[in-house]
Amino acid sequence: MKIILANPRGFCAGVNMAIQTVEEALEIVGKPLYVYHEIVHNRHVVEGFLKQGVVFVDTIDEVPANSTVIFSAHGVSPAIRNSAKQRDCTMIDATCPLVTKVHMEAIRYAKQGYNIILIGHAGHDEVEGTVGEAPNAITIVESPEDVENLPFTAEDKIAYITQTTLSRDDAQRIIKAIVAKFPHAKIPPSEDICYATTNRQNAIRAMASGTDLVLVVGSQNSSNSVRLTEIAEHDGTPAKLVDDRSELCHEWFDGVESVLITAGASAPENLVQEIIEELVHTYTGEVEERQHVEEDMHFKLPVTLRILRDQQATEVSSNS
């Protein structure tokens, strides 16, 4: 069996930053350390942090007063920030800067009086945080049919923004419907779908057609991982989303001579390598890495975390 390993894959800059934020906060703050929502949407990452004393919460009321709370990579609404502030919590914001960019667009468009169409999946953590920036101005759409049912007229001020982890094909179909119905709709100044989502999707499109099966390493609640699976299947290649090697089903590989392996932006590389080891051992697989595009994006750690780190370093220095 030929095993083709797609590059880029796995952790993006936002996920790297968020995970490093929790790791360093554990060293500085200690445990228990509270994180609002899963820091990233990957079961293994979350379970690993649970074992280290991280407490993931779904409401700020679960965070004791005067504690430290980290906001996940998906972003939060102003209401969540205010609730944490009222509890005198130290807030460490691990929101991906590319998600923050969409938040800023929502705030700006709302102040300018636009009706904002948010292309995204209702209920997703990122979408909930974005809606919270301007709840009276934002309407979520998930399909071209949703656009047709919008109550606005062609004369209304319309702007659209998108969730960062969507399929570009799906987003473009919805954008096409928006522009057709609202020709004067304001377009975001730059692409909202993030670079890592785009790169991983393009790699699938470029590589999947020559293979018999695509394996996407990622969790079921990872939007970008699910989209990778859908893109491969849409282009005609069967695809499976797996959290780790334990979810492999050997019936999938009957008659399969080549398999493409990639990973969602929140999936750890060690899980990919374990799956490769399993396939090499079971099917005498031959591994070939293919590079679609180079990535060199890096994000700084949150300001609050850097301040806490500097304070700790000063205390250690003064006590030595």
Image (cartoon, rainbow, N blue to C red):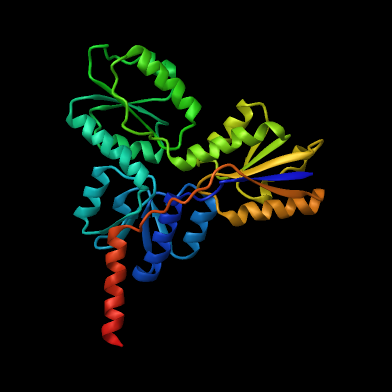
Q: Quadrant of the N terminus?
A: top right
Residue in the image at 18% along x and 25% along y: 113
Mark yes or no: residue 223 visible.
no
- Relative to 293, say whether 91 is above or below: below
In which quadrant of the rendered image does the C terminus lie? bottom left
- At horizontal 37% and vertical 13% (from top left) the residue drawn is 180
Out of 34 and 8, give the one closest to the viewer: 8
Q: Which corner quadrant of the image does residue 304 belong to? A: bottom left
The location of residue 177, given as percent across then percent down, is 40, 16
**Residue 241 visible in rendering:** yes
On the picture, is 222 further left or further right than 187? Answer: right
- Side of 235 relative to 155 (left or right): right
Q: Residue at x 22, y 34 (%)?
A: 108
Please state the horizontal and vertical placement of residue 93, each as a whole percent of the image: 31, 53
Residue 171 drawn above or below residue 178: below
Number of marks present in the image shown: 0
Of 50 and 152, the residue lying toward us: 152
Q: Quadrant of residue 217?
A: top right
Residue 319 position by quadrant: bottom left
Q: Is residue 13 above or below residue 226?
A: below
Q: Position of residue 124 (x, y in %)?
A: 41, 37
Q: Position of residue 159 (x, y in %)?
A: 28, 24
Direction from residue 159 to residue 198 in the image, left or right: right
Residue situated furthest bottom in the rendering? 320
